[in-house]
Image: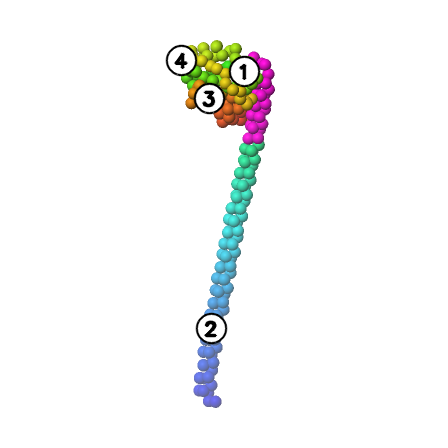
Amino acid sequence: MSAGTEKIVSSIMSDAQIKAESILAEAEKEKESILSEGEAQAVAEKEKILENAEKQSQMRYQQIISEAKMNSRRMELEAREEVIEEAFNKAEEKLKELASSDASEYKTSLEKVIIEAGTEIRGGDMVVLVKESDVAKIKSSLPSIEKSISDKTGKPTKLEMGENINTIGGAILKTKNGEIEVNNTIEARMLRFKKSLRSEVAGILFK
């Protein structure tokens, strides 16, 4: 091979070497870039997963706390309701005991509820219904009760005893034609006033 040929071959080989090295450098650079991007993407993905997991964890935590508070409140309300009902049951037992006795307090109360019912009906001819044991307690007081109702309503009032009823105590009054009736038995009054009394009872029991 002549000196000129060798020079040409050497030049070609040198250029090829330089080009090869350049290609390899570019490939290495591209590889590093890809690896760097991949690592950054992996870190970002990891952060995203951790962030989502943290959010899910917080949401679940808040849900558990909220459920616990709700259950606690429900149990507290149920316990309060139980205590209030027990108070009403005891009150009913006391009233039943009082209404079964010959206490003047009950007789006065019985007269009062009859007057209230008669006044609500606005007087006139009415029938009084009480339990059997209360007939004797009230019969002799009818004239004074009639007078009280007449004075309150401005209408002449006449009461007569009707059939006996099954009740703890108290009375039912109705017009003679049966068109108007007022139930002032102990059970009916407790039922009517229970809602308003409930808040008072709760206020006393849970100060």
- Amino acid marked by disc 3: Val
Tell me whether circle 2 and circle 1 mark residues in contact (CB < 8 Å): no
- In the rendered image, the residue lying farthest to the left is 154
Which kind of residue does numbered mark 4 sit on? Lys
Residue wearing tag 1:
135
State how the image is colored.
Answer: rainbow
Which amino acid, by three-letter code, is at mark 1? Val
In the depicted structure, whether residue 63 falls above or below residue 103? below
- For marks 2 and 1, the one nearer the N-term is 2
Q: Secondary structure at mark 2?
A: helix
Q: Earlier in the sequence, mark 1 or mark 3?
A: 1
The amino acid type, in three-letter code, at marker 2 is Ile
Q: Residue at x 59, y 16 (%)?
A: 101
| C-alpha distance separating marks 3 and 2 | 108 Å
Magenta span: 81-104
Q: Which residue is mark 4?
A: 155
Image quadrant containing the C terminus: top right
In which quarter of the view is residue 147 placed? top left
How packed mark 3 is, by other alpha carbons closer than 10 Å (few <14, some 14-19, many 20 or more), is some
State the separation of the CA atoms marked 3 and 4: 18 Å
Query: Can residue 91 be spotted in the picture?
Result: no
> Mark 4 and 1 residues: CB-CB less than 8 Å, in contact?
no
Q: Which residue carries the number 2 mark?
A: 23
Residue 41's x, y, as percent? 49, 59
- Give the Cα distance between marks 1 and 3: 18 Å
